Image (cartoon, rainbow, N blue to C red):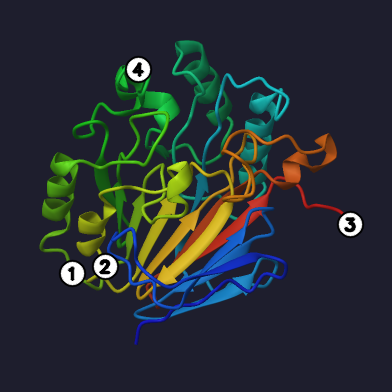
Amino acid sequence: MPASRSCPLEGTLKKTIIHDHQKDGIDRRGFLQCMAWAGTGVVWTIGAGMASSKAFGQESDAAGKGGFSFVQISDSHMGFNKPANSDVTATLRAAVDKINMLPQTPDFIIHTGDLTHSSKPAEFDTLDQVMLGAKAKQVFYVPGEHDNSVDDGKLYLDRYGKDAKGKGWYSFDHKGVHFVGLVNSAALEGMGKLGADQIEWLAADLKGRSSSTPLVVFAHLPLWTVYPDWGWGTQDSEQALSYVKRFGSVTVLNGHIHQVMQKVEGNVAFHTAMSTAFPQPAPGSAPAPGPMKVPDERLRSVLGIAEVAFVPQTKSLAVIDMPLVAEVG
């Protein structure tokens, strides 16, 4: 039986979506969109046809059962140097330190785009140097618009896309889970787009795979329409999402909006991550999106990472959002 649940965090913004005006393939009747932009954190466990949630800090059922974990980071924006964060290298290092302090070393790291702020070689160099400090040595990337809009992604592809298809999409399997990295960024403004070639590739990649295979899809921009007025969504996601709905457990990871938002529809759980660089305002709370200045003592409490754990016995995935430091008070 399909399940739709809101997150349990107190003080979060809840917005009921009554109609699917964006026609992106998601049934929104009565669905609660849940946001926890301050990085409090929530655990989502996704099983066959059901979803449950726990507040961050509660013990995860995914621990110690022979599964594996990986970490999502996003929007490091190497090269950014404005009042919202004058030292993004330091906060990325803090994110790596947070990963290295986890009880078990993750199998790998997924970076969901905007590695750099201006696609400059020195910015990519700095990112690579910081990531060398992670105990988890394997890192999978997808580009954000700051990585591929300046030079059509040439520098990004030269470094991270040699074995990828098209503009950088690819897939891989790990311990029974199928991972798909998609590219939906190309312009600095406006909605994301996958394009016909990539959607056709996705259909072929998933064809013939058992619907019981846990599926993780990751891209930079959200694959569900968060806030179209700010371009927070992907205009042609409907067809792509139609190919994943038959799978019993689907987790979709994105970045771009620099804040945690969760949505579950049927067997598909959508999750957007905090940035390691700077926060952005909540949807509609400001004239436009962009770097948001917070008091210096609060900055690291609104930046963070997401740890994802897989339990093979139940074929479930749990997502735990962790700020770089806990907010006091």
First in sequence, mark 4 or 3: give its number. Answer: 4
Callout in the foreground (2, 3) = 3
Q: How far apart are marks 2 and 4 (CA)?
A: 34 Å
Callout in the foreground (4, 1) = 4
In terms of image quadrants, where is residue 46? bottom left
* Relative image position of residue 286 (x, y in whole percent): 63, 43
Callout in the foreground (3, 1) = 3
Badges 2 and 4: C-beta atoms under 8 Å apart?
no
Q: In this view, does 165 lie above or below 238?
A: above
Q: What element carries label 3?
A: loop
Badges 2 and 1: C-beta atoms under 8 Å apart?
yes
Q: Name the residue under label 4.
A: 155
First in sequence, mark 3 or 1: give its number. Answer: 1
Q: Mark 2 points at which residue?
A: 213
Q: How far apart are marks 4 and 3 (CA)?
A: 44 Å
Q: Distance between the residues labelled 2 and 3?
A: 43 Å
Q: In which quarter of the image is the C terminus?
A: bottom right
Q: Mark 1 points at which residue?
A: 210
**Amino acid on which the number 1 mark rests in the picture:** Ser
Residue at x 35% of width, y 17% of height: 155
Q: Residues within 10 Å of mark 3 (few under 14, many from 20)?
A: few
